Each structure stands twice: as structure tokens, then as C-alpha cells.
Amino acid sequence: MTWPNAIIILGAMIVVIILIGGAFSTYLDLRKAKLVSGQEEGLRQLVQRYEQLAEKTLDTQQRIAADVAELRTRTTAIEQILRTVD
């Protein structure tokens, strides 16, 4: 084997190693992007569930506030009836 052939073989090996490294790096970047995408989707679903829960909670609070107001009105009416009976 002559020196020019050895240099060509070493050069070819270096090019192959660089190409393999580039392909591996690209594979890792794609995998990372898929993982981040999956996490983002999970977060979107979590936010959506939180918003639904917040809406339900607000509706429930409004209904309870209305019920309490009605009970206060009834209590006031009962107190007035009791005062008139005395």
C-alpha cells in the first residue's frame, strides 16, 4: 500500500465517520423534537382540562351564590313573620 492510497482511504474513512455522526445527530434532533411535541400536547390537554374545571367551578359558585341569596331572602321573610306573631 502506498502513501497516496493510505491518505485516500483515511480521507474516505473520515468522510464516512462525519456522515455517520451527522446522521446520528439528525436522528437525535428528530427524536428530541418528537418528545417535545408530545410534552406540548400533554400540556395543552392539561390546560384544556383546567379551563373546563374552572368553568364548572365558576358555574357552581354562581349557583351556590344564587341559592344562598334565596335562602337569605327566605330567612328574612320568616324572621318578619315571626316578629309579627310576637
Image: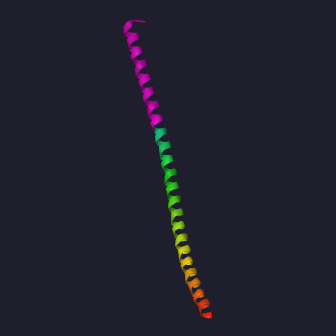
Q: Is residue 64 above or below residue 49?
A: below
Camera-side residue of 19 and 84: 84
Residue at 57% of width from left, 89% of height from top? 80
Question: From the viewer's perspective, is residue 41 above or below residue 85?
Answer: above
Residue 25 image point, x, y percent = 44, 31
Q: Quadrant of residue 18?
A: top left
**Residue 19: x and y, percent?**
42, 26
- The percent position of residue 47, horizontal first and vertical second, equals 49, 56
Region in magenta: 1-29
Which residue extends farthest left? 4
Q: How many marks?
A: 0
| Quadrant of the drawing holding the N terminus | top left
Residue at (45, 26) in percent of width and height = 20
Query: Is residue 13 shown in magenta?
Result: yes
Q: For the C terminus, give its image quadrant.
A: bottom right
Residue 57 placed where, x, y %?
A: 54, 66
Of all residues, the one furthest to the bottom in this rendering is 85
Q: List the single residue furthest toward the front.
A: 86
In the image: residue 44, left or right of residue 15: right
Q: Which residue is rendered at x = 40% and y = 22% of the image?
A: 15
State left or right for residue 83 relative to residue 21: right
Q: Is residue 44 magenta?
A: no
Q: Residue at x 58, y 80 (%)?
A: 71
Main structural element of the magenta stretch: helix, strand or loop?
A: helix
Q: Nearer the viewer, residue 60 or 84?
A: 84
Say which of 67 and 15 sits in front. Answer: 67
**Color style of the picture:** rainbow
